[in-house]
Amino acid sequence: MSTATLDNLRAYYEQEYLRNHPDMDVGDVPAKFEALRPFLDEASRDIPHGSRRVVEIGCGSGALLTLAARHLQAQGIGVDLSGTV
Amino acid sequence: MLPRCDVVMFADLVEHVPHPREFLNSLRAARHAVMLVPLESGWFSDLVYGYRRHLGKPTNYETCGHLHRWTAGGALRLLWAAGLEVVSYEVRPGKFSRYTTWRGRLYGGFSVALYRVWPWLHQRVFGAYTLLAHCRANQED
């Protein structure tokens, strides 16, 4: 992806999107986690505790990643385009 | 580049990505991918979406930055085309909106009634569902 496209996307999410959705990654995080939990359990079944690493792309504030990493007893790494969330 | 990991996850993300197939293909570096993808496409919802765009009224494209709209089948085909094997998945209905206008109530009432009578048809007509999936890299690629 070109740098110009990334800059445009970043600008859109840091300005317009956050203005329209101030609680974008807080309000429905528990419901999302509950929906994803069985799939996270299935994915991590064959990975031993203590060595698990989970990455969330588009993590925002990291609320969902925190719940997932705690549940899986994993190291959590968040990646996000925006530097302001 | 994806950091080394066992599980990569994302929720409400891929519909914002300009090139979703390339993005999903890049996830093959992880052992497992777990995702939540909104499914907004349906026969009637696509008609409304096109009509609103034609009139210049805001849609999820403008208000939420949703660049893509999928049905469940379309999203699963995209995962397969990106080289991901779907281990398990579930399609769930979203929240039913509360409407205040008589047209909205008529629309909402019909939507709820159809969901109760024939959920499969409701999904095809109205969209507004969510795909939850666990994938791994397709070893045949």
Image (spheres, rainbow, N blue to C red):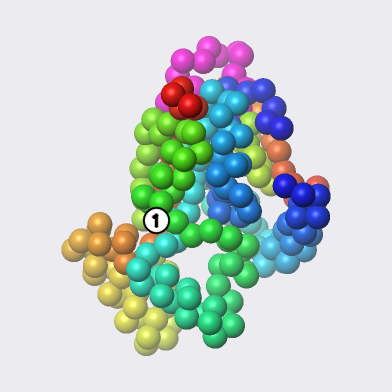
Q: Which residues are magenta?
A: A41-54
Judging depth in this view, the residue of B73 and A29 nearest the camera is: B73
Q: Indicate the position of residue B44 as horizontal and vertical percent values.
A: 36, 72
Circle 1: element type? loop
Give the answer, above or below, for where B62 lies relative to A9. Answer: below
Does residue B20 show up magenta in the picture?
no
Q: Residue furthest front?
A: B141
Give the answer, above or below, for where A49 lies relative to B5. Answer: above
Q: Indicate the position of residue A64 as horizontal and vertical percent values.
A: 60, 41
Q: Mark 1, residues whose alpha carbon is within 10 Å: few (<14), some, or many (≥20)?
A: many
Judging depth in this view, the residue of B128 and B74 nearest the camera is: B74
In the image, A1: left or right of B96? right
Q: Indicate the position of residue A17 as horizontal and vertical percent values.
A: 69, 63
In the image, B55: left or right of A78? left
In the image, A6: left or right of B137? right
- Tell me which residue sits at (69%, 46%) in the image: A60
Does residue A51 show up magenta in the picture?
yes
Q: Is residue A7 visible?
A: no
- Tell me which residue sits at (25%, 57%) in the image: B120
**Image quarter of residue B118:** bottom left
Tally of numbered discs: 1
Q: Is residue B97 visible?
A: yes
In the image, A59: left or right of B132? right
Judging depth in this view, the residue of A50 and B12 nearest the camera is: B12
Q: Indicate the position of residue B71 as horizontal and vertical percent values.
A: 39, 56
Give the answer, above or below, for where B80 lies relative to A72. Answer: below
Amino acid of disc 1: Thr
- Tell me which residue sits at (55%, 44%) in the image: B21
Which residue is identified by label 1? Answer: B71
Q: Given the image, what chain letter belongs to the residue carrying mark 1?
A: B
- Tell me which residue sits at (57%, 47%) in the image: B20
Q: Residue furthest left?
A: B117
